[in-house]
Image: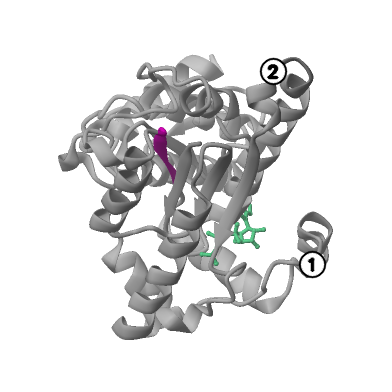
Amino acid sequence: MPLITISGFPASGKTTRAHQIRDFFNSKIAELAPTDSRIARLKVHVISDEGLGISKEVYREARPEKDARATFYGAVKRLLSTDDIVIADGMNYIKGYRYQLHCEAKALLTPSCVVYVGTPAEKCKEWNVAKGSGEEEEKEEGVEGGQKSREAYAPDVLDNLIFRYEEPNGMTRWDSPLFIIPWMDEDVPGEEIWNAMVNNEAVKPHLATVLKPAAEANYLQILDKSTQDVVSAVLEYQKTNGAGGSVQIPEASNPIELPANHVGLAQLQRIRRQFISFNRQHTAERTRLKSMFVEYLNKELE
Ligand SMILES: Nc1ncnc2c1ncn2[C@@H]1O[C@H](COP(=O)(O)OP(=O)(O)OP(=O)(O)O)[C@@H](O)[C@H]1O
């Protein structure tokens, strides 16, 4: 059965997403198994570095990293079978490596997809620090049953991995269908992934499956950063000037006209998420993003 290849920066939330997908799939199996013997046989597996005992230090040098990749690959290959759904929870950051994984699935005549966890580098750094400090230990132990290692990446290893990362491109055979999960989304598009992987449905391009031209690498990150900058500017303005007024945002052609009442962070983030949802499938011109978001905010705040 299918192969779901997770891909994303280090500490971008890949395991969190892999577990959300696993839980969604397990609940689908529990629901459908009584009436469908094919579904009843399915088992979901998550393969990860942590599960295989691979330390983050392997990413410091080429040789141990290569060995670790081979171990991970072997574990995925061993499990891929007609009744097993494998979630490959790793960075899977090398294009050629994702290509090989795709070929393994293809050889078994089973579908594969890529789930790209789209988290900006700055957030990953923040989450990596939180992980290393053990800040989230209690919460994670509850969620993971204490299975998950608390190991963080050394800062130089993290930077280097981000630098080397080869972003998935949904236009290529091996990275498609491509499901992009922005970091601020609470849920994963479980139903769409299930339909594509278990029901073999062709995936129609929609919000979660962005077919991005290669030229638009990092588009999601830029969309995220541009809109976050605007939100921060509004909050900053209100802090000093109070409610109401006109805020000129650098790089935006028009100002934001604030309403007489105070606009809160939750409201701004909600509007921002909507804007991102609408625009993550278009590859809007980067230089226009802030102006577009300002226009959108003005309409929503009217
Ligand atoms: N969407 C999110 N919002 C807030 N915090 C998150 C989110 N996703 C993950 N985190 C936190 O970020 C940290 C890293 O998450 P996680 O372990 O899932 O990332 P990862 O990409 O699997 O990391 P690694 O590269 O180390 O395997 C964890 O402490 C997790 O609780």
**Distance between mark 1 and mark 2 Cα atoms:** 34 Å
Q: How crowded is mark 1: few (under 14 residues within 10 Å), some or many (20 or more)?
A: few
User: What residue does disc 1 label?
Assistant: 146
- Ligand 1 visible in quadrant: bottom right
Dot 2: element: loop
Of badges 1 and 2, nearer the viewer stands 2
State the residue at coordinates (66%, 31%).
262
Q: Nearer the viewer, residue 111 or 255?
A: 111
In the rendered view, tell whether residue 6 sits above or below residue 164.
Answer: above
Query: From the viewer's perspective, is 88 left or right of 62?
Result: right
Quarter of the rendering containing residue 62: bottom left
Q: Which of 299 and 159 is in front in this view?
A: 159
Q: Which of marks 1 and 2 is nearer the N terminus?
A: 2
The image position of residue 124, as x and y in percent, is: 50, 62
Amino acid, disc 1: Gly
In the rendered view, tell whether residue 213 sits above or below residue 8.
Answer: above
Amino acid, disc 2: Asp
Q: Which mark is residue 36?
A: 2
Q: Is residue 21 visible?
A: yes
Q: Residue 298 carries which label?
A: none
Q: Is residue 13 visible?
A: no
The span picked out in magenta is 110-116
